[in-house]
Image (cartoon, helix red, strand yellow):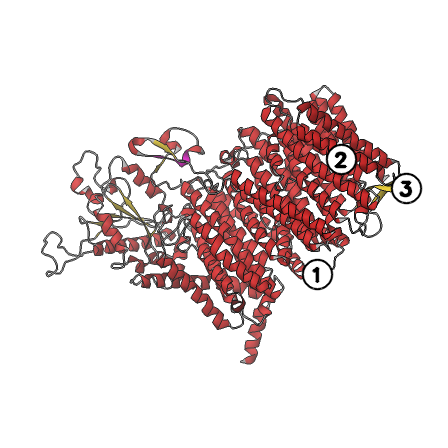
Amino acid sequence: MSKATAKSPWVVHFNCNSCNGCDIEFLACLTPTYDVERFGILHVGNPKHADILVVTGSVNHRNKHVLKNVYDQMPSPKVVVAMGVCPATGGIFADCYNVLGGAAKVIPVDVYVPGCPPRPEAMIDGIVEGVKILAQKRKDSETVQAELPVKIVRPAAVPEAATPNAETTGQAVAK
Amino acid sequence: MTEWVLFGLIGVPLLVGGVLAALISSDRLRFALVAACALLVAAGGIGLVALTAQAEGPGRIWSYTVSGEFAGVGTLLELAILAVIFGVAVKIRNFWITLFAVLQVILAIGCYFWGHVEEGEFILFRIDNLSRIMLLVTSVVGAAILVFSIGYMREHEHHKPEGAGSLKRFYFFFLSFLGFMVGLVVSNHLAYFSFFWEATTLCSYALIGQDGGEARRVNAVRALLINSFGGVALLLGIFLVKYYTDGETFLNLFEDSAYALLPAILLCIAAFTKSALFPFQSWLLGAMVAPTPVSAMLHAATMVKAGVYLVLRIVPGFYEDSGVMLIIAFAGSLSFVGGALLACTQSNGKKVLAYSTISNLGLVVACAGIDSPLAYAAGLAIITFHAISKGLLFLCVGRIEQRIGSRDIEDMDGLLYKMPFTACVILLGMMSMLLPPFGMLLSKWLAIEATIRSPFLLVFMVMGCALTVFFWAKWIGRIQHTGYHEFLPKEEIPPSMRISLGALALMVLGTGLVTMLIYTDVFVPMSQAVYRGGADLNWKALSEVSKFSAVVIFVGIALGFLFFYFLVWRRFRPHNVRLPFLCGENVTAANSGHDSREIRSYDFYSVGGKIEHSQVTSFYFRGIISEPVATRVMNWIALLIIIVLIGKTIAAM
Amino acid sequence: MDQILTRISEICGNQYVYSALVLILAPLAGAFIMGLDRVVTARMQGRMGPPLLQPFYDIFKLFGKEPIALHRPQIMYAMLHLVFMMLALLLLALGNDLLMVLFVQAFSVICLVLGGMSVRSPYSWIGSQRKILQMLALEPILLVMILAINLRDSSFLGSEVMKNSQPLLLSMPLLFVAFLCVIGIELEKSPFDLASSHHAHQEIVKGITLEFSGPFLGLLEIAHLYEVAFFAWLMWAFWHTNFWIGCVVALAGFLFLTIVDNAFPRLTTTWMLRFMWTVPLTLALANLIWLWV
């Protein structure tokens, strides 16, 4: 059963108040170039059918209720992936008066994928990590509930010849 | 002995019931009288059927012969009723009804004096299988409706409009109607038949106008008008029967006379008006303003069945004239499709039921016109099953309307929680119109199988079948549209209504259980007894399906329900419940401070914390099909068909 | 060896064993066809796509989720939908009356529609309304098809049809085309994917299946597999004389539907009604009249 869970993770995507940068990159993952469907990932648009909740954008006082609502309507086992820095810490909006400072203030987050926006490869890495956690949760629900460590995914290294921009360089490391 | 039961069945509701009800001043006594009448009618009907079913001979026909002078009595009764209608017409100053009444009087008198004035004996009452079915339907379903009317009218008295008639008037006509209806289905002599026919027209007129008011008066007059036109056609047909065959009974109609076709067709046209087929359907739709027991009794279960009863009685003798029969089948199928199509566009519950009734009656006529014993059996089956189901549905809609104050489908939201008993019963009724293995679906199945003979009819049949599913599914969905409830409340419902609805629901279930059995053991032999043709029977299909016994299906479903109840229903806890997904934040009892789980689940919080209400309605073809235009088109086509029918009849003579 | 084979075929010929085999193998065949559908779609879009066994993973995963629902009648309708779809396939496999088979299948779809309408969700409600409109669009053609089969073989029984030596496709080509349109509607392929389609391109958020989740969605998915097997069987029956050519016909039909699915956008319900009641209905009636004459 957990093998099947690992091979068919369905994703719902919720945009808190994102600038849409991460959303566009995420939707790019669904296109033929990056093609997440080969992992069995389907983008279903509603929490009731989904296993993985992908959160983008910073959580504020207004949309925390909606985020909680969406999270509650998902059947367990479920995994939350925070895409980009906004749902991780608030991102560049962290000092705003209404920003709470990360999705973890509202719902339990399992994987962080930092970046502004993260590259599609990093996003796929993050979702794959989330799938592993999902399979673990599924297996654990048959035995004992365990505390799982939170993963952080770093963006992959860009080949030197490709781009001159230094900010997007990094190492792909999964703890 | 049997004849006394029969006389009692006609006379008790009529004289004892109707007249007494009009004379008694105490309401409680009157209601007790109604209950007593209901019991007597039901017992009498079942008893009569059981007694006459023991007659010997093919078809087990029981007849009651009287001497010749009773024909005069029949004509006198006819003239009496026509005089009453004439008086009514003069009082309301309607030209056409007056004209029709005068024409009918002339025809009746002419009929009596033409040829030999009756000297020999003739058969006055003749009960064969068809009459027995109609008797059972009338007495049993009629009794249930009578019982329901006790609870309904008691409540109705509290908020009836100004100028409404009294309970005395209501029960006088309502009880007498039952007597007339019984007389109608057993009469063999045409003068008596037309007397009962006109009497039911009169009762219908009186009962539609029961609650007073301008709109009801207009509708009642329209009903009287169209039915009077039918009466003219009826009397013209009877006159022609006397003219050509010198006798005035149904048996004379079937004598091998070259001229019997024209009177038969005229009788069929009269039947079309009574059964509200296109183009005569407007009176039935207008009649929906009457109180619900009237709609159930007259305009669903019994009176409109009189028309198709007449068609079914006439048609088996004329299977050789297949061209004419085909046109009758066409007229029927047009009503079948038209009724179903227009029912899809209505949101008024009673109008949907009215159109559905028209549609089903059209199907019976179509079955009659297809020359196949299997189709005839299907027609008989539809009459029975439809009467029970439609009576049940009308009564439920009446009860719902009293409770929620509206008869619109869109308002019947969440009924499963507000009125659980009624909601379950009405769901059962609607499922029985639609689903296997209940009788209606089997009848449609047989009718489609029989249509294979004529591909042109086929188009209508398949379209009608598809459309029927549409409007029933919409309505069923709306009624069981509800939120999560841990327990269903107990509904407060007057005992008479509960008994009546429960009895009808049990009848629906019971007949559904043994449908195949009823078919093979009752309806098919009946149709074989009357059918004089030699066409082949689709026996193999029938026997194959009857192997797949309905009892097995029901037992399977019952087991499935038990399984479901214990494994799912009881294990489902409130923590398994979620709210619907509204792409936003749902308004819940917790976060809104209100306490109602029913209404709020469509609401969500939008900008600034404002609560938005969302609402979805069903699909009513608005902008695509409009009722007036569609009605006009279909009326013209139906009129054309009738003209072709008459023309072809005259040409075939 | 021969004795073993005859023994096996004897056992399979037994009605109960045969029924059990049909009920177990049909969803497998259905899942295979659905997996193929997704792979072909992916290749047409120039990407790799999921593995062929993906539908199995999907369904097993669904049964591993927490059972949540909006209320209990919804669960009942999901179960009824599955049971009656299985019954329809079983009746078809046993060669029973085709009209009854059609009615049972229609009943199964109605149960799904009622399940969608029983929950207080606007998207689900709209999806259900569209689904009954779809049924309205396709019932006439299915009925005409069954009546045409009767005209040709003088019987409604599936077993009688199987005995005829001439394949159905040769006498009913136009009806096959109309039937393909019907399957397209029933399996929610573009341009008819109005009520709830599979690949998340939906304006009413999954429509009729929205409020089903976890194991109950799994029930609906299994019913869908049976439905696919049901229509595959019917398409196979169009060339029932030769087993392999029949399979080719069925696969070709599904392939055609997949290609049309990817090529067409979604259109409106009124267009669908207008289209189905004119073009395929005319084709079907023309075929019927040709058979009658």
- Dividing the picture into quadrants, the one containing residue B102 is top right
Residue at the image point whose x is 53% and y is 48% from the top: B564
Q: Are marks 1 and 3 on the same chain?
A: yes
Horizontally, is C277 left or right of B13 in the view? Answer: left
- Residue closest to the eye, A33 or C143: C143
Q: CA distance from mark 1 to mark 3?
A: 40 Å
Q: Is residue C75 in view from this perspective?
A: no
Q: Which residue is mark 3?
A: B120
Instruction: Decide whether residue B601 is among the magenta residues.
Output: yes
Q: Residue at x 57, y 41 (%)?
A: B427
Which amino acid, mark 3?
Gly
Q: Which residue is mark 1?
A: B536
Badge number at residue B462: none
Residue B196 circle label: 2
Q: Of discs 3 and 2, which sits in the foreground?
A: 3
What separation in Å lies between label 2 and label 1 (alpha carbons)? Answer: 37 Å
Marks 2/1 same chain: yes
- Per the image, label 2 sits on a secondary structure element best described as helix
Q: Which range is magenta?
A: B600-605
Q: Residues within 10 Å of mark 1 (few under 14, many from 20)?
A: few
Q: Is residue C49 above or below residue A134?
A: below
**Residue at image coords 89%, 38%:** B68
Q: Give above or below for B156 relative to B306.
A: above
